[in-house]
Amino acid sequence: MKRKVLEALKKNKDIFISGEELSRKIGVTRTAVWKHIKQLKEEGYEIESISRKGYRLLKEPDTLDPNALIIEIGSNFIGKHIYHFDSVDSTNTIAKKMAAEGAFDGTVIIAEEQIGGRGRLGRSWISPKGTGIWMSIVLRPNIEPTEAAKITQITAAAVANAIRKATGCEVGIKWPNDIIIHNKKVCGILTEMGAELNSVNYIIVGIGINVNVDIKEFPEEVKKIATSIRACVGKEISRKDIVKEILLEFQKLYLDFIENKNIKKSIDICKKYSVTLGKQVKIKNRDKEIIAEAIDLTEDGQLLIKNESGEMQTVISGEVSV
Ligand code: BTN
């Protein structure tokens, strides 16, 4: 109901809408309307109320209010269901639990803070309150487990496009899953899977973005390798705008994969913004390390390299330093 009140106010932004009209449109009493308006005000919405004229939405807070996101995204798939938490251990852990309990395909989990945020290779992910995007998407694709890595490439492409569009910040992609600015990481992607030998039950895509994080607060060792969007553009940036763009971009690219078995658009974006291709790279995979030239991305999203003996080979995953 609160979402319906907000939707009506957003549609009539800057115009008064009477309590009577709201109650008629939504099908609740005027007292119920008044209660939802009061709640919205408490959440930071600036709503003017004048007797006999009604209510007028003046300003929206830059929070990750799931109601506002659902209205603005208007999707019937990715982001149709959004759960927002104040503080969680890890959104990926919550998403896995929800997926195991039957959450819908495309469900999104967002938290203001993670106290046990997880990165790749068992690392932790610093996720301070209210300043970043700590978000996971539940997916239920009908694919082979071996194809899961493609979803990381789709996500990297969607996030890079979305950040560029929403902030103007010229981010690059470091294969396979880092979004970077001037060689420092601004976003990491953690793809996890619940699967049997031949079938995927669910895939969780976790996205962590340092949006307005104060980089001075990072521990010394992290300062050397991480940055934030605020540091790139020199001002606070709306997290909501970025989340919205990511979910819209992701849906477009992901549907192309699911419906047409095509990730060409995603791979083209990954190539266009790649900071890896054409460079000498060091690739760490388990306990092996190779130095090679990064040549291209294959149509499956694998990295094509020329090793030190001049032979071409493909790499499925690994940690790359440029
Ligand atoms: C990496 O190591 O680069 C991946 C970092 C992924 C962090 C995100 S934040 C949201 C989601 N929840 C987690 O615990 N991790 C991912």
Image (cartoon, rainbow, N blue to C red):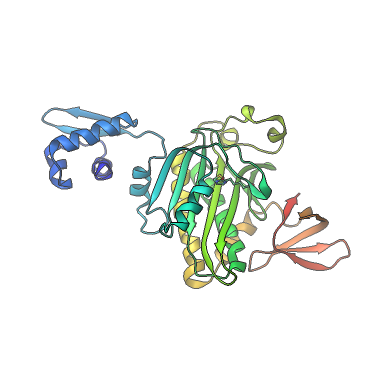
Q: Is residue 280 visible?
A: no
| Residue 15 percent location from the top left of the image | 21, 37
Q: In which quarter of the image is residue 194?
A: bottom right
Total numbered labels: 0
Residue 235 against residue 248 in the figure, above or below: above
Image quadrant where one finds the N terminus: top left
Left or right relative to 255: residue 20: left
Q: Residue at x 23, y 41 (%)?
A: 5
| Residue 49 percent location from the top left of the image | 20, 28
Q: Which residue is drawn at 64% across and 59% down?
A: 271
Left or right relative to 129: residue 273: right
Q: Quadrant of residue 34?
A: top left
Left or right relative to 272: residue 85: left
Left or right relative to 316: residue 264: left
* Front one among 123 and 44: 123
* Front one among 106 and 15: 106
User: Which residue is at the far right?
Assistant: 309
Residue 304 against residue 132 in the figure, above or below: below
Q: Can residue 96 be seen in this view?
A: yes
